[in-house]
Amino acid sequence: MARAPAARPAIKHLDGFLEMLAAERAAAVHTRDAYRRDLTDFAAHLARRGLAPATADAAAIRGYLAALNQRGLAAASVARRLSALRHYYRFLQGERVRADLPTTGIDRPRTRRHLPRVLGEAEVATLIETAAAAAEAAPGDAAAARRHALIELLYGTGLRVSELVGLPRAALAADPRFLVVRGKGGKERIVPLSARARAALAVHLACRTERAPAKPARYLFPSRGRSGHLTRRRFAQILADLAVAAGIEPARLTPHSLRHAFATHLLAGGADLRSVQKLLGHADIATTEIYTHVLDARRRALVEQKHPLARRRSGG
């Protein structure tokens, strides 16, 4: 006889915590679901020891983190669980459920920061030229026009893929040279649009209007799916097809790699870090600084390959 699944342990004030995330921090549904899963896992761990999250102390939290390490979770996953606990206990403190913060003094696990894969400027130019040529060769082809507009916008603005595919028509500001983008946490930022991106977007919208003149879509890149707009998965497929057409290994071309290219190429061209941070919508400049590491690696390689002393040491 199959064993019935164990009941989930009750977590005091969980619903209130999740409601706060939605109301005050504009946390997305998938973010709230992740917090719920993390706290439920924490509660299950404590329940086996006769404890509960609302009253757990620092020792119990450290024991849970140690158990996660024993289970083989990556440092980044453990750090995310700790972040969820910190937010939960700050909420309990703010609601005066408890006076202390048991996560104080618990260090975040060290995680390895992988340098992003970056496409070269010539490779990006080839991608854009390939998309533009296909759109020009088939006037009125909505799919080709959309693909060209997508890559021009992504590389020209550095938007997150979720921001790009979910752009509403209202994002087109009164000044056509800019987009109004709502990023993480519901924060808005103004992003400039290049003349090339504006032109490609205009062709895309004209094709959309021809197909459905009486019913303007809510989104710049609409879809018949449940979300109403192009999905990230479908966009990844579009990029993979474009990579093949441009002679680039598809695995190297992702929406995120183009965002990386946008940031790295700006810094290589002399842009200051603060400006790039604002364009990318990073809350913390430390997140933007990873792109300086990419540039540092390139500069070291340049010196090793081109400096006269380096050539002598290598026998060149």
Image (cartoon, rainbow, N blue to C red):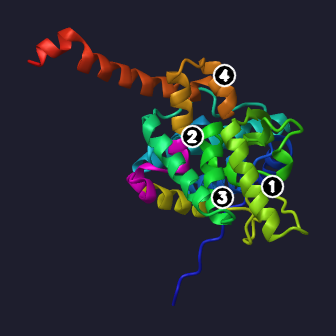
* Magenta part of the chain: 244-258
Q: Residues within 10 Å of mark 4 (few under 14, many from 20)?
A: few
In the image, which is nearer the foreground, mark 1 or mark 2?
A: 2
In the image, which is nearer the foreground, mark 3 or mark 2?
A: 3
The reply, left or right, for residue 219 in relation to residue 40 is right
The reply, left or right, for residue 19 in relation to residue 45 is right
Spatial CA distance of label 3 from label 1 is 45 Å
Q: Which residue is mark 2?
A: 259
Check the image and report above or below for 295 versus 237.
Answer: above
Spatial CA distance of label 1 from label 2 is 35 Å
Check the image and report above or below for 298 versus 182.
Answer: above
Q: Residue at x 66, y 22 (%)?
A: 275
Q: Is residue 232 visible?
A: no
Q: Residues within 10 Å of mark 2 (few under 14, many from 20)?
A: many
Contact, CB < 8 Å: mark 3 with mark 1? no
Q: Which residue is mark 4?
A: 275
Q: Residues within 10 Å of mark 3 (few under 14, many from 20)?
A: many
Spatial CA distance of label 1 from label 4 is 38 Å
Q: Which residue is mark 3?
A: 145
In the image, which is nearer the foreground, mark 3 or mark 1?
A: 3
Check the image and report above or below for 43 versus 102.
Answer: below
Label for residue 175? none
